Image (spheres, helix red, strand yellow):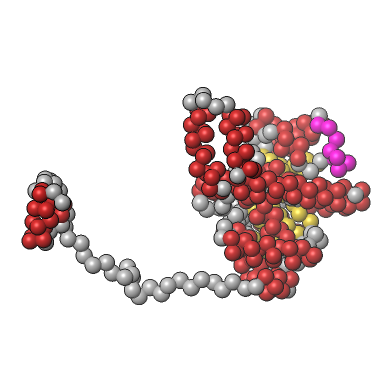
Amino acid sequence: MSYHNLEFTIHNLITMQHPENDDIYKGLTVNAGIEQPSMINPYMKPKKRKRLFTPAEYVEGIVKGDITMLSRAVTLVESLLPEHQAIAQEVIEKCLPHTGQSVRIGISGVPGAGKSTSIDAFGLHVLERYGGKLAVLAIDPSSEKTKGSILGDKTRMEKLSVHPDAFIRPSPSAGSLGGVARKTRETIVLCEAAGFDKIFVETVGVGQSETAVHSMVDFFLLIQLAGTGDELQGIKRGIMEMADGIVINKADGDNAERAELAASHFRNALHLFPAPESGWTPQVLTYSGFYGLRIDQVWTMVFDYVDFVKKNGYFDHRRNEQAKYWMYESINEALRDSFYHNPTIASLLTCKERQVLDGELTSFVAARQLLDVYFKG
Ligand code: GDP
């Protein structure tokens, strides 16, 4: 120990001060700390973790139509914890034989199009007119950023949320769009096993999420508004091509005429598209979700479509195609996860990225090298 350090330590021992209060640290004063309490609020009871059931218990509850069990199983599906995922996957597998007997409808529209108002009205109409049980799920790609789901929020569907035959679940919020979509698809399985024979999957009409919803539903309903006359330019061709039906909302009061005009524009535009594989000609209707006008026509269209494609075999064909699509999506997602969570890859990624940015490696060579490490390592 150097002379200075020895003197420093002795000085501290004598004065019992914090070492950083020594004169050599001029301008710095560190107070002696206080003893930390064991808990900030000693009266607060530690939160009890909900007991996990066995997969068989979840399945038994779900198949009996027990909503609490269904909700808990959905929470496991959405959880990122490996132990929850393991149970969830087993529950899904055991629920599969009880599924498939439903009609799945995707509902899309830009924010403000009237999705929540419409779904509230649509849901009540469908339950009243056709009976059965309805689950409303959602895919909201923005919910990861906002850390709260916009879609599927119960308060947005006032009447439906208190209906005994309706189950409303907000969008899962964690992960990529693919991950969120997979969780919604798995939730469909659980809901169907619980006896829900009508499933609505809602999504915001902005970008990729429609493709995800389209890949899990039997009918894709696009909600539009009569706008400034250039509404057709605003929506992407791909989204219109996906639609099995386009409905113009808010066809009430002064807006009724403009809604009819918009509908004829959409009908003309649809004529320019190639005939859909289903053999069904997509229809364009106007309605008012808020005032409950012509909602019956919207649903007659949806169920006419279902009858039509069940007869011509397209209903089963589309479901088979979707099953195939999801198999590949699951493989892609698992491979991606395994690659990026590999510790060697994680440690090399930034370095390779830098080399690409500095022009030392091309993107392809960098990717090849990383993949070689992954597959051979
Ligand atoms: P979302 O963002 O697509 O879920 O749209 P909302 O259901 O929240 O509706 C947006 C706004 O449009 C609200 O102020 C609704 O009251 C209004 N709205 C919804 N449907 C109708 C309708 O059929 N007619 C009229 N006039 N307004 C409506």
Is residue 228 depicted above or below 286 in this figure? above
Q: Is residue 375 magenta?
A: no
Taking the spot 73% from the left edge, 63% from the top edge, the residue there is 93
The answer to which of 197 and 24 lies nearer the viewer is 24
The location of residue 366, given as percent across then percent down, is 57, 32
As drawn, the residue found furthest toward the right would be 311
The answer to which of 349 and 140 lies nearer the viewer is 349
The location of residue 121, given as percent across then percent down, is 69, 56
Taking the spot 78% from the left edge, 51% from the top edge, the residue there is 323
Which region of the structure is painted magenta? 273-281
The location of residue 63, given as percent across then percent down, is 74, 71
The location of residue 123, given as percent across then percent down, is 71, 58
Position of the C terminus by quadrant = top right
364 displayed left or right of 124 = left
Is residue 71 depicted above or below 121 in this figure? below
Taking the spot 75% from the left edge, 34% from the top edge, the residue there is 266
364 displayed left or right of 214 = left
Taking the spot 51% from the left edge, 48% from the top edge, the residue there is 146
- In which image quadrant can residue 54 be found? bottom right
Magenta region, main secondary structure:
loop
The answer to which of 43 and 129 lies nearer the viewer is 43
